[in-house]
Amino acid sequence: MISGRLRNTEYVINLRALQDNIQAQRAVLPADSKILAVVKANAYGHGLVPVAQAAMHAGATGVCVAILDEALELRDCGVDAITLVLGITPVEEANVAAEAGVSLTVGSLDWLIKYHQFARQFNWNKPLKVHLAIDTGMGRIGFTNVAEFDQAVKILRQYPEFDFEGMFTHFATADSADATYFNRQYTRWQKFIDSLDELPPYTHMANSATGLWHRQQITANTVRMGISMYGYNPSGKELTTDLKLQPVGTLKSAICFVKKLPAGESVSYGATYTAQQDEWLATVPIGYADGYPRCMTGFKVLVDGQYCPIAGRVCMDQMMIRLPKYYPVDTPVILMGRSGDKEITAEDLAEQAQTINYEILTNFNNRIHRSYHD
């Protein structure tokens, strides 16, 4: 039995669209710019390994992940390009990264000193590739003091246990129309850059939003493409972009049961929906256990190019929709994507759920089968 493929619900991933998005970003950057494809969180729900491989084929120099486990999964599947763990890895596990040639983020002197002690004590013989994180205002991880940063650089350059591969920062408001805080962070970043007589091979301060709306201020040779690589706007609907981004994923299912619902009959938990007249009702095999939020109750899907409202509460594994007319079992249902001349986007889902498109995408879990197409 092929697990996960026996239900008529799937997430269809267009790898050609993903590659086109990468090339669209590359086309507006300086010729020598490198791109790191951000594939953390199962590639924003699109599938870690296939997306990483497609990104590399499109010209990405390497990839970024959140945790060491993701990096090791890529190594096990043959992805041997630069792979940077963006989160903090415990010192005791860092030798695993060194052995695998995985790059780690370091944001404190204490971490470097402890690792150096471990490396000497246990005679670890492969250098650890390090990217120093600079906290210019995100408030998450990284150096905030230039003097301590300079000390860290000296340690990295002094000891053979380290390979000073990169440095980076992350902007908190690059997707906002108000650039005041962005410029504040940018000024701080420049102080760290100016403190070095020689930059490491990879300097990256541009996330997706910076690559879209602050390209003229990129003072680094590497851009991290996150949500823009998947064809989605980092700002939701606040800002528009001049890049022609193509959404990569289509979430689709199909009618598994259909019936005539008499007027006065109710649907789903809590009986919150009651038919006002006789109507056609269809059941669709997807629910909040798949990552399709329960708060989509009252939203809509697409059937045959027509919007169809969700009737009653979304259940754990199923939900019901109201049809404009009879449609047979196996009729396609689009939950996110295009049908005819109409479309439901990740931003539309996020607006209904009162969240952001990132959360919608990363919530689609592995119970939904992924299929990949060029």
Image: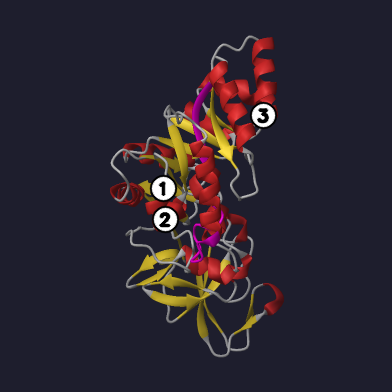
Q: Which residue is at a point 39% across and 39% down the rendered structure image?
A: 221
Mark 3 neighbour class, 10 Å CA radius: few under 14, some 14 to 19, many 20 or more = some
Q: Which residue is at a point 61% across and 12% down the rendered structure image?
A: 124
SS category of the residue bearing label 2: loop
N-terminal label among 3 and 2: 3
Magenta span:
163-180
Q: Give the distance between the C-alpha atoms of the residues marked 1 and 3, in whole angstroms.
A: 27 Å
Asked if residue 18 can be seen in this view, the reply is yes
From the viewer's perspective, tell me whether residue 5 is left or right of residue 140: left
Residue receiving disc 1 = 218
SS category of the residue bearing label 1: loop
Residue receiving disc 3 = 109
Q: Position of residue 2 (x, y in %)?
A: 48, 41
Q: Which residue is at a point 69% across and 11% down the rendered structure image?
A: 121
Q: Give the distance between the C-alpha atoms of the residues marked 1 and 2, in whole angstroms.
A: 7 Å
Check disc 2 and give the amino acid type.
Answer: His
Question: Relative to 254, does residue 35 appear above or below in the rendering?
Answer: above
Residue 303 sits in which quadrant?
Answer: bottom left
Confirm or deny contact between disc 1 and disc 2 (CB under 8 A): yes
